[in-house]
Amino acid sequence: MDSRTTIEAMLRADLRGRTAYGAPQLDVPVALNTNENSYPVPAVVVEAITRAVAAAASGLNRYPDREFTALREALAAYLLRSGTVVSAEQVWAGNGSNEVLLHLLQAFGGSGRTALGFTPAYSMHPIITTTTGTTWVDGLRGVAGGGAFDLDVASAVEQVREHRPDVVFLCSPNNPTGTALDLDTVVAVHDAAPNTLVVVDEAYAEFARPGTPSALTLLQGRPRLVVTRTMSKAFALAGGRLGYLAADPALVDALRLVRMPYHLATQTQAVALAALDHADLMLETVGAIKAERDRLVAELTAMGLDPVPSDANFVLFGGLEDSHTTWSALLERGVLVRDVGIAHYLRVTAGTPQETTAFLQAMSDLAPQHR
Ligand code: PMP
Protein backbone atom coordinates (compact mmCIF):
# COMPACT_ATOMS: atom_id res chain seq x y z
CA MET A 1 0.00 0.00 0.00
CA ASP A 2 1.44 3.43 -0.84
CA SER A 3 1.36 6.12 1.84
CA ARG A 4 -1.43 8.04 0.09
CA THR A 5 -3.70 4.99 0.29
CA THR A 6 -2.74 4.44 3.95
CA ILE A 7 -3.52 8.05 4.87
CA GLU A 8 -6.79 7.97 2.89
CA ALA A 9 -7.86 4.89 4.87
CA MET A 10 -6.97 6.57 8.18
CA LEU A 11 -8.70 9.86 7.35
CA ARG A 12 -12.08 10.79 8.86
CA ALA A 13 -14.67 9.16 6.60
CA ASP A 14 -16.40 12.46 5.92
CA LEU A 15 -13.16 14.01 4.63
CA ARG A 16 -12.21 11.18 2.23
CA GLY A 17 -12.21 12.16 -1.43
CA ARG A 18 -12.60 15.88 -0.65
CA THR A 19 -10.60 18.53 -2.46
CA ALA A 20 -8.97 21.35 -0.49
CA TYR A 21 -9.72 25.07 -1.04
CA GLY A 22 -7.49 25.94 -3.94
CA ALA A 23 -7.76 29.33 -5.61
CA PRO A 24 -4.66 29.16 -7.84
CA GLN A 25 -1.72 31.30 -6.65
CA LEU A 26 -0.01 31.86 -10.00
CA ASP A 27 2.68 34.35 -10.88
CA VAL A 28 0.80 36.34 -13.51
CA PRO A 29 1.01 40.01 -14.52
CA VAL A 30 -2.66 40.65 -13.68
CA ALA A 31 -4.03 38.66 -10.69
CA LEU A 32 -7.73 39.40 -10.29
CA ASN A 33 -8.91 36.13 -8.79
CA THR A 34 -9.02 36.42 -4.99
CA ASN A 35 -10.57 39.83 -4.36
CA GLU A 36 -7.47 41.23 -2.75
CA ASN A 37 -6.81 44.96 -2.73
CA SER A 38 -4.38 45.52 -5.63
CA TYR A 39 -2.76 48.58 -4.05
CA PRO A 40 0.34 48.08 -1.89
CA VAL A 41 0.37 49.23 1.73
CA PRO A 42 1.25 52.98 1.73
CA ALA A 43 4.85 53.85 2.65
CA VAL A 44 3.84 55.72 5.83
CA VAL A 45 2.01 52.63 7.08
CA VAL A 46 4.89 50.34 6.07
CA GLU A 47 7.10 52.47 8.34
CA ALA A 48 4.60 52.36 11.20
CA ILE A 49 4.25 48.59 10.87
CA THR A 50 8.02 48.15 10.78
CA ARG A 51 8.42 50.26 13.92
CA ALA A 52 5.64 48.38 15.71
CA VAL A 53 7.06 44.95 14.88
CA ALA A 54 10.59 46.07 15.85
CA ALA A 55 9.28 47.34 19.19
CA ALA A 56 7.50 44.04 19.86
CA ALA A 57 10.40 41.81 18.77
CA SER A 58 12.38 41.69 22.02
CA GLY A 59 9.22 40.64 23.88
CA LEU A 60 8.64 37.62 21.67
CA ASN A 61 10.03 35.41 24.44
CA ARG A 62 6.61 35.96 26.11
CA TYR A 63 3.22 34.80 24.87
CA PRO A 64 1.09 37.48 23.26
CA ASP A 65 -1.79 39.25 25.03
CA ARG A 66 -4.30 36.40 24.92
CA GLU A 67 -7.17 38.87 25.09
CA PHE A 68 -5.71 41.15 22.39
CA THR A 69 -7.27 43.99 24.38
CA ALA A 70 -5.71 46.92 22.52
CA LEU A 71 -6.65 45.40 19.19
CA ARG A 72 -10.26 44.80 20.25
CA GLU A 73 -10.48 48.42 21.37
CA ALA A 74 -9.03 49.64 18.07
CA LEU A 75 -11.45 47.47 16.07
CA ALA A 76 -14.39 48.79 18.11
CA ALA A 77 -13.18 52.35 17.43
CA TYR A 78 -12.96 51.53 13.72
CA LEU A 79 -16.54 50.21 13.67
CA LEU A 80 -17.67 53.39 15.37
CA ARG A 81 -16.59 55.25 12.22
CA SER A 82 -19.36 53.47 10.34
CA GLY A 83 -21.78 54.85 12.93
CA THR A 84 -22.32 51.79 15.11
CA VAL A 85 -21.39 51.82 18.76
CA VAL A 86 -19.74 48.49 19.54
CA SER A 87 -17.81 47.93 22.76
CA ALA A 88 -14.48 46.07 22.90
CA GLU A 89 -16.31 43.23 24.74
CA GLN A 90 -18.41 42.76 21.62
CA VAL A 91 -15.40 42.27 19.38
CA TRP A 92 -13.54 39.04 18.62
CA ALA A 93 -10.70 38.51 16.15
CA GLY A 94 -8.79 35.72 14.47
CA ASN A 95 -6.21 34.97 11.79
CA GLY A 96 -8.48 36.12 8.99
CA SER A 97 -12.26 36.05 9.17
CA ASN A 98 -11.99 32.41 8.10
CA GLU A 99 -10.65 31.62 11.58
CA VAL A 100 -13.38 33.71 13.17
CA LEU A 101 -15.95 31.68 11.21
CA LEU A 102 -14.20 28.49 12.35
CA HIS A 103 -14.51 29.58 16.00
CA LEU A 104 -18.23 30.20 15.47
CA LEU A 105 -18.73 26.73 13.98
CA GLN A 106 -16.62 25.07 16.67
CA ALA A 107 -18.73 26.70 19.36
CA PHE A 108 -22.20 26.57 17.81
CA GLY A 109 -21.96 23.74 15.26
CA GLY A 110 -20.42 20.30 15.61
CA SER A 111 -21.59 16.74 15.34
CA GLY A 112 -25.37 16.38 15.11
CA ARG A 113 -25.80 20.07 14.26
CA THR A 114 -26.52 21.79 10.96
CA ALA A 115 -25.56 25.01 9.20
CA LEU A 116 -27.53 26.43 6.30
CA GLY A 117 -26.24 28.78 3.60
CA PHE A 118 -27.75 30.07 0.38
CA THR A 119 -25.72 28.95 -2.63
CA PRO A 120 -23.96 30.45 -4.50
CA ALA A 121 -22.20 32.15 -1.61
CA TYR A 122 -18.70 32.08 -0.12
CA SER A 123 -17.20 28.67 -0.88
CA MET A 124 -15.48 28.43 2.52
CA HIS A 125 -18.78 28.48 4.44
CA PRO A 126 -19.56 24.82 3.63
CA ILE A 127 -15.88 23.82 3.95
CA ILE A 128 -15.47 25.35 7.42
CA THR A 129 -18.84 23.89 8.41
CA THR A 130 -18.01 20.34 7.44
CA THR A 131 -14.49 20.37 8.88
CA THR A 132 -16.09 20.93 12.29
CA GLY A 133 -18.33 17.87 11.81
CA THR A 134 -21.36 20.10 11.28
CA THR A 135 -23.81 19.03 8.56
CA TRP A 136 -24.07 21.53 5.69
CA VAL A 137 -27.51 22.28 4.24
CA ASP A 138 -27.24 23.78 0.78
CA GLY A 139 -30.03 26.36 0.60
CA LEU A 140 -31.21 28.04 -2.59
CA ARG A 141 -31.16 31.76 -3.23
CA GLY A 142 -34.51 31.76 -5.10
CA VAL A 143 -35.25 33.92 -8.10
CA ALA A 144 -38.39 35.87 -7.21
CA GLY A 145 -38.22 39.62 -7.52
CA GLY A 146 -34.91 41.09 -8.62
CA GLY A 147 -31.87 39.67 -10.38
CA ALA A 148 -30.88 36.10 -11.05
CA PHE A 149 -28.89 35.77 -7.81
CA ASP A 150 -30.96 37.86 -5.41
CA LEU A 151 -31.88 36.11 -2.19
CA ASP A 152 -35.65 35.75 -2.13
CA VAL A 153 -36.76 36.61 1.44
CA ALA A 154 -39.88 34.43 1.49
CA SER A 155 -37.93 31.45 0.20
CA ALA A 156 -35.07 32.04 2.68
CA VAL A 157 -37.52 32.22 5.59
CA GLU A 158 -39.25 29.04 4.40
CA GLN A 159 -35.93 27.16 4.14
CA VAL A 160 -34.89 28.27 7.63
CA ARG A 161 -38.26 27.15 9.05
CA GLU A 162 -37.99 23.82 7.24
CA HIS A 163 -34.42 22.94 8.23
CA ARG A 164 -34.26 24.61 11.67
CA PRO A 165 -30.46 24.93 11.36
CA ASP A 166 -28.22 25.70 14.33
CA VAL A 167 -26.32 28.25 12.22
CA VAL A 168 -27.44 30.31 9.20
CA PHE A 169 -24.96 32.07 6.96
CA LEU A 170 -25.89 35.25 5.15
CA CYS A 171 -23.25 36.95 3.04
CA SER A 172 -23.61 40.66 2.34
CA PRO A 173 -22.27 41.80 -0.09
CA ASN A 174 -22.43 38.23 -1.32
CA ASN A 175 -19.37 36.49 -2.73
CA PRO A 176 -19.37 35.55 -5.64
CA THR A 177 -22.48 37.39 -6.82
CA GLY A 178 -21.62 40.84 -5.40
CA THR A 179 -24.94 42.18 -4.19
CA ALA A 180 -25.69 43.27 -0.62
CA LEU A 181 -28.77 42.22 1.32
CA ASP A 182 -31.31 44.68 2.63
CA LEU A 183 -31.69 44.66 6.39
CA ASP A 184 -35.32 43.48 6.20
CA THR A 185 -34.00 40.18 4.81
CA VAL A 186 -31.54 39.79 7.67
CA VAL A 187 -34.27 40.52 10.22
CA ALA A 188 -36.73 38.14 8.52
CA VAL A 189 -34.21 35.27 8.52
CA HIS A 190 -33.25 36.04 12.12
CA ASP A 191 -36.87 36.09 13.28
CA ALA A 192 -37.74 32.88 11.41
CA ALA A 193 -35.35 30.85 13.53
CA PRO A 194 -35.73 31.39 17.27
CA ASN A 195 -32.75 29.25 18.33
CA THR A 196 -30.41 29.82 15.42
CA LEU A 197 -27.13 31.70 15.28
CA VAL A 198 -27.32 34.11 12.33
CA VAL A 199 -23.93 34.97 10.84
CA VAL A 200 -23.78 37.90 8.43
CA ASP A 201 -20.46 37.74 6.59
CA GLU A 202 -19.64 41.35 5.67
CA ALA A 203 -16.11 40.84 4.34
CA TYR A 204 -16.78 43.40 1.58
CA ALA A 205 -18.96 45.88 3.53
CA GLU A 206 -16.73 48.91 2.92
CA PHE A 207 -17.29 48.65 -0.85
CA ALA A 208 -21.10 48.74 -0.68
CA ARG A 209 -22.95 51.29 -2.78
CA PRO A 210 -24.50 54.21 -0.89
CA GLY A 211 -27.66 53.37 1.02
CA THR A 212 -26.55 49.87 1.95
CA PRO A 213 -26.60 49.75 5.74
CA SER A 214 -24.55 47.21 7.66
CA ALA A 215 -26.11 44.50 9.80
CA LEU A 216 -24.00 46.00 12.61
CA THR A 217 -26.93 48.37 13.10
CA LEU A 218 -29.11 45.36 14.01
CA LEU A 219 -26.88 43.94 16.77
CA GLN A 220 -28.49 45.81 19.65
CA GLY A 221 -31.06 43.50 21.28
CA ARG A 222 -30.26 40.52 19.03
CA PRO A 223 -27.88 38.22 20.92
CA ARG A 224 -28.08 35.54 18.21
CA LEU A 225 -26.76 37.84 15.48
CA VAL A 226 -23.09 38.00 14.48
CA VAL A 227 -21.44 40.26 11.90
CA THR A 228 -18.04 39.17 10.59
CA ARG A 229 -15.58 41.56 8.93
CA THR A 230 -12.01 41.42 7.67
CA MET A 231 -8.98 43.63 7.15
CA SER A 232 -8.13 41.58 4.01
CA LYS A 233 -10.19 43.49 1.45
CA ALA A 234 -10.90 47.25 1.75
CA PHE A 235 -8.18 47.52 4.40
CA ALA A 236 -5.54 46.11 2.02
CA LEU A 237 -4.08 43.76 4.63
CA ALA A 238 -4.79 40.24 3.35
CA GLY A 239 -1.25 39.13 4.21
CA GLY A 240 -1.64 40.39 7.78
CA ARG A 241 -4.40 37.82 8.40
CA LEU A 242 -6.78 39.68 10.62
CA GLY A 243 -10.52 39.08 10.62
CA TYR A 244 -13.00 40.00 13.33
CA LEU A 245 -16.60 39.94 14.39
CA ALA A 246 -19.05 41.97 16.42
CA ALA A 247 -21.73 40.30 18.53
CA ASP A 248 -23.22 40.15 22.00
CA PRO A 249 -20.53 39.97 24.74
CA ALA A 250 -21.93 36.60 25.91
CA LEU A 251 -21.45 35.15 22.44
CA VAL A 252 -17.92 36.51 22.26
CA ASP A 253 -17.22 34.94 25.63
CA ALA A 254 -18.34 31.54 24.33
CA LEU A 255 -15.66 31.69 21.64
CA ARG A 256 -12.98 31.61 24.33
CA LEU A 257 -13.97 27.97 24.86
CA VAL A 258 -12.77 26.92 21.43
CA ARG A 259 -9.91 29.21 20.42
CA MET A 260 -6.37 27.99 20.95
CA PRO A 261 -4.61 29.95 23.72
CA TYR A 262 -2.68 32.92 22.30
CA HIS A 263 -4.08 32.38 18.81
CA LEU A 264 -3.23 35.93 17.70
CA ALA A 265 0.56 36.28 17.48
CA THR A 266 2.27 39.34 18.93
CA GLN A 267 3.36 40.43 15.45
CA THR A 268 -0.16 39.95 14.06
CA GLN A 269 -1.57 42.20 16.77
CA ALA A 270 1.20 44.77 16.22
CA VAL A 271 0.69 44.86 12.44
CA ALA A 272 -3.09 45.16 12.69
CA LEU A 273 -2.88 47.88 15.34
CA ALA A 274 -0.42 49.92 13.29
CA ALA A 275 -2.68 49.60 10.24
CA LEU A 276 -5.79 50.57 12.23
CA ASP A 277 -3.90 53.57 13.52
CA HIS A 278 -3.75 54.71 9.88
CA ALA A 279 -7.25 53.65 8.91
CA ASP A 280 -7.84 56.66 6.65
CA LEU A 281 -4.71 55.97 4.64
CA MET A 282 -5.40 52.22 4.46
CA LEU A 283 -8.91 52.87 3.16
CA GLU A 284 -7.86 55.54 0.70
CA THR A 285 -8.10 53.23 -2.30
CA VAL A 286 -11.70 52.15 -1.70
CA GLY A 287 -13.17 54.94 -3.84
CA ALA A 288 -10.84 54.16 -6.75
CA ILE A 289 -11.64 50.43 -6.52
CA LYS A 290 -15.39 51.13 -6.53
CA ALA A 291 -14.89 53.26 -9.65
CA GLU A 292 -13.11 50.34 -11.37
CA ARG A 293 -15.88 47.98 -10.29
CA ASP A 294 -18.49 50.28 -11.84
CA ARG A 295 -16.32 50.58 -14.96
CA LEU A 296 -16.16 46.78 -15.22
CA VAL A 297 -19.97 46.55 -15.02
CA ALA A 298 -20.42 49.26 -17.66
CA GLU A 299 -17.80 47.93 -20.09
CA LEU A 300 -18.83 44.29 -19.77
CA THR A 301 -22.42 45.35 -20.45
CA ALA A 302 -21.22 47.25 -23.52
CA MET A 303 -19.53 44.04 -24.71
CA GLY A 304 -22.91 42.31 -24.62
CA LEU A 305 -22.11 40.38 -21.44
CA ASP A 306 -24.22 40.11 -18.35
CA PRO A 307 -22.49 41.51 -15.22
CA VAL A 308 -24.30 41.29 -11.89
CA PRO A 309 -24.63 44.64 -10.04
CA SER A 310 -21.99 44.70 -7.29
CA ASP A 311 -21.53 46.18 -3.81
CA ALA A 312 -18.12 44.53 -3.51
CA ASN A 313 -14.65 44.79 -5.08
CA PHE A 314 -15.44 42.23 -7.76
CA VAL A 315 -17.93 41.59 -10.53
CA LEU A 316 -19.56 38.31 -11.50
CA PHE A 317 -20.34 38.35 -15.18
CA GLY A 318 -22.35 35.95 -17.31
CA GLY A 319 -23.18 35.48 -20.96
CA LEU A 320 -20.10 33.32 -21.70
CA GLU A 321 -20.52 30.29 -23.91
CA ASP A 322 -17.99 28.26 -21.94
CA SER A 323 -16.58 29.90 -18.83
CA HIS A 324 -13.62 27.55 -18.56
CA THR A 325 -12.48 28.27 -22.12
CA THR A 326 -12.69 32.01 -21.41
CA TRP A 327 -10.81 31.54 -18.11
CA SER A 328 -7.96 29.70 -19.90
CA ALA A 329 -7.83 32.20 -22.76
CA LEU A 330 -7.56 35.09 -20.28
CA LEU A 331 -4.79 33.27 -18.41
CA GLU A 332 -2.87 32.83 -21.68
CA ARG A 333 -3.03 36.62 -21.93
CA GLY A 334 -1.65 37.01 -18.39
CA VAL A 335 -4.97 37.77 -16.69
CA LEU A 336 -6.08 35.47 -13.87
CA VAL A 337 -9.78 35.63 -12.92
CA ARG A 338 -11.90 33.19 -10.92
CA ASP A 339 -14.00 30.35 -12.23
CA VAL A 340 -16.45 30.00 -9.35
CA GLY A 341 -18.16 26.95 -10.81
CA ILE A 342 -21.27 28.73 -12.13
CA ALA A 343 -21.82 27.75 -15.75
CA HIS A 344 -21.41 30.66 -18.19
CA TYR A 345 -20.08 33.01 -15.48
CA LEU A 346 -16.67 34.19 -14.25
CA ARG A 347 -15.70 36.54 -11.41
CA VAL A 348 -13.17 39.33 -11.78
CA THR A 349 -11.70 41.48 -8.99
CA ALA A 350 -11.73 45.26 -9.36
CA GLY A 351 -8.11 46.36 -9.05
CA THR A 352 -6.14 49.30 -10.43
CA PRO A 353 -7.26 51.14 -13.61
CA GLN A 354 -4.33 49.47 -15.45
CA GLU A 355 -5.50 46.02 -14.36
CA THR A 356 -9.07 46.76 -15.46
CA THR A 357 -7.76 47.94 -18.82
CA ALA A 358 -5.62 44.80 -19.22
CA PHE A 359 -8.58 42.56 -18.39
CA LEU A 360 -10.98 44.41 -20.69
CA GLN A 361 -8.40 44.42 -23.49
CA ALA A 362 -7.88 40.66 -23.09
CA MET A 363 -11.66 40.12 -23.11
CA SER A 364 -12.11 42.14 -26.27
CA ASP A 365 -9.29 40.17 -27.96
CA LEU A 366 -11.26 36.95 -27.48
CA ALA A 367 -13.60 35.50 -30.04
CA PRO A 368 -17.13 36.91 -29.60
CA GLN A 369 -18.56 33.69 -28.15
CA HIS A 370 -15.93 33.73 -25.42
CA ARG A 371 -16.57 37.21 -24.24
N1 PMP B 1 -15.80 35.97 3.75
C1 PMP B 1 -15.90 36.18 2.44
C2 PMP B 1 -17.23 36.43 1.85
C3 PMP B 1 -14.75 36.17 1.64
O1 PMP B 1 -14.86 36.35 0.32
C4 PMP B 1 -13.49 35.95 2.24
C5 PMP B 1 -12.20 35.92 1.44
N2 PMP B 1 -12.26 35.65 0.15
C6 PMP B 1 -13.46 35.72 3.61
C7 PMP B 1 -14.62 35.75 4.34
C8 PMP B 1 -12.18 35.39 4.34
O2 PMP B 1 -11.24 36.32 4.29
P1 PMP B 1 -10.06 36.42 5.35
O3 PMP B 1 -9.91 35.08 6.01
O4 PMP B 1 -8.89 36.84 4.56
O5 PMP B 1 -10.54 37.45 6.34
Image (spheres, rainbow, N blue to C red):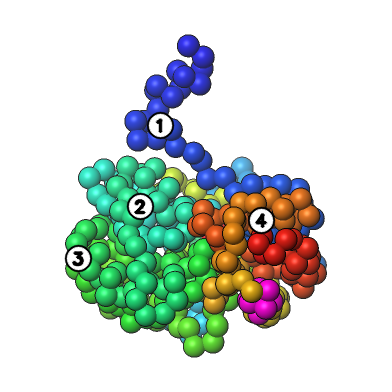
Tell me the residue that label 2 is attached to. Answer: 105
Do the CB atoms of the residues marked 1 and 4 lie less than 8 Å apart? no
Image spot of residue 290 (x, y percent): 65, 78
Is 298 magenta? The answer is yes
Q: Which amino acid does label 1 sit on?
A: Arg
User: Given the image, on which type of amino acid does mark 2 rest?
Assistant: Leu
Callout 4, which amino acid?
Thr
Judge depth for marks 2 and 3 and give the one in front. Answer: 3
Seen from the viewer's position, the closer of residues 18 and 170 is: 18
In-front residue for pair 130/19: 19
Query: What's the CA distance linking mark 2 and mark 3?
Result: 20 Å
Q: Magenta part of the protein: which range?
A: 297-303
- The residue beneath circle 4 is 326
**Disc 2: CA contacts within 10 A as few (<14), some (14-19) or many (>=20):** many
Q: Earlier in the sequence, mark 3 or mark 1?
A: 1
How far is the residue under mark 2 from the one under mark 1?
21 Å
**Residue 1 in view in this figure:** yes
Q: Label for residue 16?
A: 1
The image position of residue 246, as x and y in percent, is 42, 69
Q: Earlier in the sequence, mark 2 or mark 3?
A: 2
The residues tagged by marks 3 and 1 sit, at their Cα atoms, a distance apart of 31 Å
Dot 3: within a 10 Å radius of its alpha carbon, few (fewer than 14), some, or many (20 or more) residues?
some
**Residue that label 3 marks:** 161
